[in-house]
Amino acid sequence: MPKMPLMPLLLFCTLLGGHGIVQAQAPGQPSAVSKTNCDRDCLLEFTRNYLRALANHDPDSARLSDTVVFSENNVTMPVGNDGLWGTLSKVRDGALEVADTRTGNAAWFGIVEEHGNPAYLALRLKVENRLVTEIETIVNRLPDMPKPFGDPDQVVHDASWDDLLDKEELRPRERLVAVADGYFSTVELNDGQVFTDFTDDCGRLENGISTTSNGGSASIAQGCEQQFKLGIYRINKRVRERRYPLVDEERGIVVASGFFDHANTFDRYTLTDGREMKTVLKWPNSISLLEAFKIRGGKISRIEAVFTYVPYFMPSPFAHANVDFQTR
Amino acid sequence: MLIRLPSALAAALLVCAPAVLAQNPSCDAACLTSIAERYLQDVARQDASGLPWADRVRYTENNVAMMIGDGFWGAGPGVSAGGLFLPDAITGNIVWFGITSEHGQAAYHGLRLRVQDAQITEVESYLGREGTPEVFGKVDQYRPEPAFAERPSSAAGLSREQLVALVDGYFNSKQQNNGQVFTAVAADCRQQTNGKSITSGDHWAATVARGCAAQLRAGLFKPVDRIRARRYPVIDEKRGIVVALSIEDHATRFVDYVSTDGKPLAVEVEYPNSRGRLDLFKISEGEIVAIEGVSVFLPYYIHSLWQD
């Protein structure tokens, strides 16, 4: 019987050992089998239960994992007494709710009150083994720098978010993410080139304001695609740390997270039709957001976002390091 | 030929080594000031290529790490003449406090450089800009606190540790402020933040109590939950100046409170927030006589990239 040289044998045994088996799984996955022991209703109930716990200032009832990670506007902190946990006075009825049974994530876009003051909240929970392991919150409050903040009493989430798509409108998960990612690529360095598709009636609600029909950028151009073709959003040097933790294929919804970096290397720019624009802020700043996309037949029909200002280039605790952006 | 040191001597050298290194003999106060001046000139020209960078450099702006060239460096930067240079050859740090601009819009700017072997290893900037919920005094009405231009101070004689203890006691007094004061503050102590007087004029705190000491005794800063990540990178014993960096947490679990003498008060911002601060403390006759600095409105509980 031929003898195997010692070093290759040791290497072979190492690969067969515990580490070798773990590395054989799909990258980033704890197991080669995805167990979905919490369906859509179950996931949505987790967000509702979390918000009840928040309103009652009772973290013990939030079904939290021992290792839960909680962030508010990208800062991690203990759960239970800090941030919203120390200030929340009410959770208002009416919200956009999304769930992804494959990734175990659920999202909630709505309005809460802190000491009676309304604030826009976007919440993402990750549920594993029927315990919450990640809580990501973006809270948009006043007073702050100039930004959209719609009348909280007038906010209506478009009814189409809950529509189950017809068969011909359905798209696979990867394509839905590609359409959403194309939106961010269009926003980044917006110069009129459009990297995604929109329905003709596409509308966007940002912090409770329709910015495609009657507020914000809508005063310059109306409609999702029309605004991008004008290059209104050129100030976005980067759309960074893009993540897509939720996809609901039946409803054609993607929930994304990311940052819009306004480096403000310039404070004036020109639209594609020749009009000159001035940046509102003169200094570097970033916008941190959770954003939902409704995609019908491969085209974005509705967008809803909650965002707030954060210090320029601030990272997310849930994303990889900024290595991709260090040399830009 | 190998020279063997007696083990006791070798041990003594090891113990002493940090102190010897900490003297930073390769760059004295004049050297540090020269590097800071060059840095400010070059940032205004947006040309970092001529600065003496170390192989590994860390740059943060308002407590976010980024590349040199981004942030303030890229935003049409300008540097106003003047400002206060505060070198500390023992720690190898120099702090500059002055006014800069982005596309012509002025900001109060606290800059810290750390220099090792005559090369820049750390750059930390705090920019107090107009238009955030934090206080901001109009630049055309700004007058630098004169106490910091005085020299030498009668504080000479206080050790570095004593100077730091006074400032640390100020922070201990301010956090969870209930009127108890853990430091020595002159009766006429003045404070400016982002060019705005906190202890006189029309600032809300000044309308309740005037002067640092009176404000601390009145418990005006009760909403400050914690002052953490405190660092004291520059101490000037001769001039009686300490530069402090810190993060102030306002959890805002309450919005109404009362001063120690019963006056009803309310927080300015009714949601959780933190402030990143770079403050200069002037100490004379064993008391804090003036505080001037930059304060930046930040997401609540933001972690310090330099210490936590």
Image (cartoon, grey):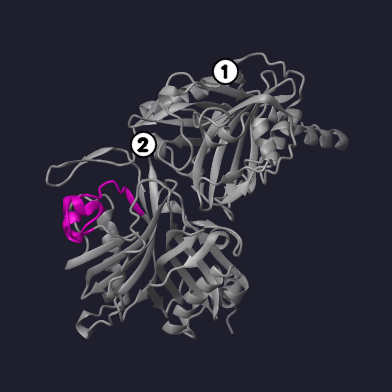
Query: Is B248 in the magenta?
Result: no
Q: Quadrant of residue A176?
A: bottom left
Residues flagged by tags 1 and 2 on a common chain:
yes
Q: In which quadrant of the rendered image does the N terminus of chain A lie?
A: bottom right
Identify residue type, mark 1: Pro
Left or right: A313 in relation to A199 = right
- Label 2 resides on the chain identified as B
Of B260 and A179, which appears nearest the observer? B260
Residue B146: mark in rendering: 1
Element type at marker 2? helix
Where in the figure is residue B194, as x and y percent of width and height? 50, 32
Badge 2 crowding class, 10 Å Cα cut-off, few under 14, some 14 to 19, many 20 or more, is some
User: Residue farthest to the left?
Assistant: A273
Of B9 and A91, which appears nearest the observer? A91
Identify residue type, mark 2: Gly
- Label 1 resides on the chain identified as B
Left or right: B14 in relation to A200 = right
Left or right: B219 in relation to A158 = right
Badge 1 crowding class, 10 Å Cα cut-off, few under 14, some 14 to 19, many 20 or more, is few
Residue B74: mark in rendering: 2
Of A122 and A270, which appears nearest the observer? A122
Earlier in the chain: of badge 1 and badge 2, it is: 2
Where in the figure is residue A56, as x and y percent of width and height? 57, 70
Element type at marker 1? helix
Disc nearest the viewer among 1 and 2: 1
Q: Which residues are magenta?
A: A212-239
Where in the figure is residue A195, as x and y percent of width and height? 22, 60
Name the residue located 41 percent from the left edge and 65 percent from the top edge. Answer: A111
Name the residue located 33 percent from the left edge and 71 percent from the top edge. Answer: A254
Q: CA distance from mark 1 to mark 2?
A: 32 Å
Q: Quadrant of residue B129?
A: top left
Where in the figure is residue B34, as x and y percent of width and height? 52, 20
